[in-house]
Amino acid sequence: MWQRIKNIYHLVNAFLANVWFGFPSRNLNVIGVTGTDGKTTTTSLIYHILHASGYNASMISSVGAIIGGRDYDVGFHVTTPSPWALQRFIKKAVDVGSKYLVLETTSHALDQHRVWGIKFDVGVLTNVTHEHLDYHKTYENYVEAKAKLLKIARVAIVNRDDESFNLISNLKFLISKLVTFGMTKKADVSPKTFLFKTNLIGQFNKYNVLAGIAACVSLGIEGNKIRKAILAFKPPIGREDIVYKNSFTVMIDFAHTPNAFEQILNSVRPNMKGRLIHVFGSAGLRDATKRPLMGEVSSKYADIIILTSEDPRSESVEEIMDNIESGIKNHELGINLFRITDRKEAIESAIEMAGRGDMVLITGKSHEKSMNYGEGEIPWDEYGAVRNALKLRKINI
């Protein structure tokens, strides 16, 4: 009941914001990108391809907004801004002459009508994996919320290989506008139908690239321009971001779901000579059912696991770590598992124990500039914490 009231509140605000700013999206080609994992990378890639192809493009994502080449902050823990902030950004994009706007769009924003009134030319669904079940309750509801973007878009681009496709493909409104991407022969856009090279690591990034290709092809962007842009693309901040590489390596990544863990860990593990030291936690007052699964996936690949804080909010950090630990295989041996509540100390400990050939992988926070312990947001800098930890080892970067 309370959520329904909040949704009406957001809908009213979206209507008023659209009226106030004159329904600005009608003057743009808007590409919406949704999905559990890969949203930010795919959003950034589409923007990069459009920009590199010579078009005036703007972007709004979880790492910030770029409007007419100028960077804007979207706030703490924000992917899709509130209706008023969102429409203000869209109006700015129109005012600076942008032809395209790439918008990262969450299931919450879609379900709460925060993107009401936006004319989406293309809707991209990267995947739907285990996340946000505290809000959506079931996987089917989660897919349904994501599919709202596909319903209102002129072109609907979906992952042919993803579990969600079994549900998506049954939606009758998609028949005339569906474009699929994937590794299988059945996909409309695949490595066989569109050859490309990328410097991004991992199979998961090939899917992100294919999603970006499908979106840009549907917009009429020339194939050679797309290929050239893909090869030059660098991932956004906090995505498989190697911040130190010498005798050992330190990587920061935003992975915070079981699937994202599987993808990033599976990608870095085969190329390692030493140990994999994984530092992570899980957000408080959010989907608790994913925590044991995150622990299980990490224990498949990591040699050392360090559990720590990650926006616990008003939840007990110890209880969150208990939830994660319950899924860690062989955790009862206690050999490779450490629990360090303070995230700064956890990062320092991981970097202190790193030896030749090891990798320290720190996931969950990346670009975010705040931490929430239940009493509001306080400043946090993941990159600064790594720099300080390296300095303690008398290493400067």
Image (cartoon, rainbow, N blue to C red):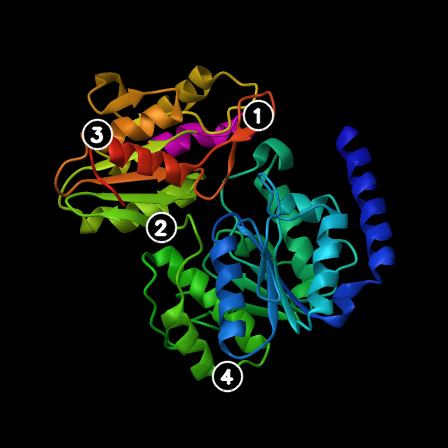
Query: Is residue 182 shown in magenta?
Result: no
Task: Using a 10 Å C-alpha cutoff, classify the residue at mark 2 as few (fewer than 14 neighbours), some (14 to 19) or many (20 or more).
Answer: many
Q: Earlier in the sequence, mark 2 or mark 3?
A: 2
Callout in the foreground (3, 1): 3
Task: Using a 10 Å C-alpha cutoff, classify the residue at mark 4 as few (fewer than 14 neighbours), some (14 to 19) or many (20 or more).
Answer: few
Q: Where is mark 1, residue-wise?
A: 285
Whether pointer 4 and pointer 3 mark residues with C-beta atoms closer than 8 Å, the reply is: no
The quarter of the displayed image where residue 378 is located: top right
x, y percent for residue 39: 52, 54
Q: Where is mark 4, residue-wise?
A: 222
Q: Earlier in the sequence, mark 4 or mark 1?
A: 4
Q: Amino acid at mark 3?
A: Glu
Residue plotted at (51% across, 54% down): 40
Task: Using the image, tell me which numbered label, if any, was put on residue 352.
Answer: 3
**Residue 200 higher or lower than 374, as above or below:** below
Q: Where is mark 2, residue-wise?
A: 240
CA–CA distance in space, label 3 to label 1: 31 Å
Can residue 181 be seen from the camera position used here? no
Callout in the foreground (2, 1): 2
Query: Which corner quadrant holds the C terminus?
Result: top left
